[in-house]
Amino acid sequence: MSTKRAINALREAKAAEEERNHNAIVDALTRIRNGKPQHIRLRPGVRVSVTDLAKEAGVSRGALYGNHKALLDRLEKLNDKRSGGVTSRRKQAEEKEIKKAELVQQLTEDKQKLARENYNLNRQVRVLEEKIEGLTTQLGRQSKVVPIGKREQ
């Protein structure tokens, strides 16, 4: 019975710590959003990093990445708002995704074009093989086979 109590006590302690961390991070985000952080210095045009948020909230970076990823999204939005719109890093990522999609589209079109070309070439090969077979059959019917280059005069 004491083992179960100990396990329950650990679970409750962990849940309480998670709640304290969550509240501390939310409070830190609010202070940063209001421009009144207590433990970091805000600089115009400079993003608030995860390390800055962790320092302001009094939690570890691991706590942010491990259990509070949704709050990291809020930090990203806050940084976007502070910078007056989409950050250059996010804009670069979006442009990269657009280029990637265009490349995929172009490669798909190229693949379809090559598939059509391959089909046509295979069809031509079949036609030529049939001609060769017909000529071979025709040569086999002739009584006298004359090697090429040694024609009778």
Image (cartoon, rainbow, N blue to C red):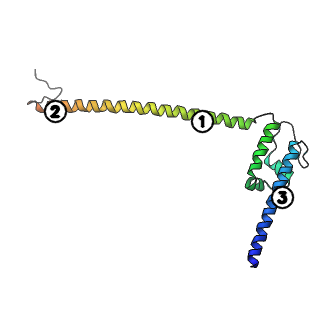
Disc marking residue 100: 1
The three-letter code of the residue at mark 2 reads Thr
Vertical side of 11 occupied by 85: above or below? above
Asked where in the image residue 119 lies, by quadrant, the reply is top left
Residue 101 relative to residue 131: left or right: right
Q: What x and y, as percent, mark residue 67?
A: 74, 56
Vertical side of 23 occupied by 110: above or below? above
The three-letter code of the residue at mark 1 reads Lys
Q: What x and y, as percent, mark residue 83?
A: 81, 35
Q: Residue at x 73, y 37 (%)?
A: 89
First-in-chain label (3 vs 1) = 3
Query: Spatial distance from mark 2 to mark 1, Cα to Cα?
Result: 55 Å
Q: Nearer the viewer, residue 116 or 140?
A: 116
First-in-chain label (2 vs 3) = 3
Q: Secondary structure at mark 2?
A: helix
**Residue assigned mark 2:** 137
Residue 60 relative to residue 141: left or right: right
Q: Nearer the viewer, residue 136 or 35?
A: 35
In the displayed image of the protein, which residue is found farthest to the left? 143
Q: What is the total number of numbered labels drawn onto the structure image?
A: 3
**Residue assigned mark 3:** 20
The three-letter code of the residue at mark 3 reads Arg
Q: Nearer the viewer, residue 43 or 20?
A: 20
Name the quadrant of the C terminus: top left
Q: Residue at x 77, y 53 (%)?
A: 64
Q: Residue at x 24, y 32 (%)?
A: 130
Q: What x and y, as percent, mark residue 74?
A: 78, 45
